[in-house]
Image: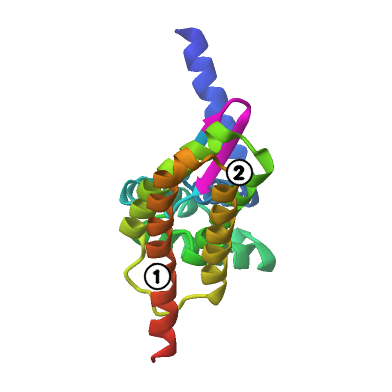
Amino acid sequence: MKFLSWLCCCLFFITACQSDTDRLREAEHRFLEIMSVPEKFQLTAGKDTLFLPVLPGPESAQESKAQAAELQAQIRKIDGKSLGNSDRKRLDALTKATEDLVARGVSMPLEQISMQVAEPFRQALIYNNTELTRRLVEYIPAYVAEMEQRWPPDTSKKNPEIVHAAESAYDALLQLEQESPATSKEQFEAARRAWKDYMGLCRSGLLSQNNK
């Protein structure tokens, strides 16, 4: 009991002695932790692993909102008047960014995710792992369906590079098909159909932008 009382006193003393600059630094670090948890689908065969990037789901947004609300309470304890000009600007920027995070949760930019979709296809070509290729090809329809479900409703500001990334992935898929046994024909056909739907989704945003 005495030890617990002593520990609590020590923790209180350490917290009380923390400067507002230290609190700001900790808050910034915590903000980056909340933001740096992108979702990925993982496929593994033997020693090889592919990571398929995916847009954040509603559950992730709700969890990050709750974490951001806790961070917001922590930020409010920082006395901006005690900070220098540069630190005060950092505090203002962090406060605004956290307010936005509380409002909508982690929402990775569409471009940041969609421009990475070709990478696992290229990695599959490098690995030349038959089992891993099979798992990737079989998973593509479900992956596309998940991406479509999570696609943001506002598609008015699309980057043409996401179309290029989707087309590059499709080219890699065709190459994987050429290097795979004929017994996988049906799986590749389903994967190609699904990926064409994904490319159409990417292009539709681009078209809506061009039609404005």
Residue for point 63% across, 27% down? 47
Q: How crowded is mark 1: few (under 14 residues within 10 Å), some or many (20 or more)?
A: some
- Magenta region: which residues? 44-52
Q: Position of residue 178 (x, y in %)?
A: 58, 50
Q: Is residue 88 above or below residue 64?
A: below
Q: Name the residue under label 1.
A: 200
User: Is 64 or 73 nearer to us in this picture?
Assistant: 64
Q: Which mark is residue 11?
A: none
Q: Which of marks 2 and 1 is nearer the N terminus?
A: 2
| Quadrant (top left/top right/bottom left/bottom right) for the C terminus | bottom left
Q: Name the residue under label 2.
A: 124
User: Considering the numbered disc 1 on the image, is that residue within a helix, a strand or a loop?
Assistant: helix
What secondary structure predominates along the stretch shown in magenta? Answer: strand
Residue 42, can we see it? no
Picture quadrant of residue 88: bottom right
User: Is 116 or 134 nearer to us in this picture?
Assistant: 134
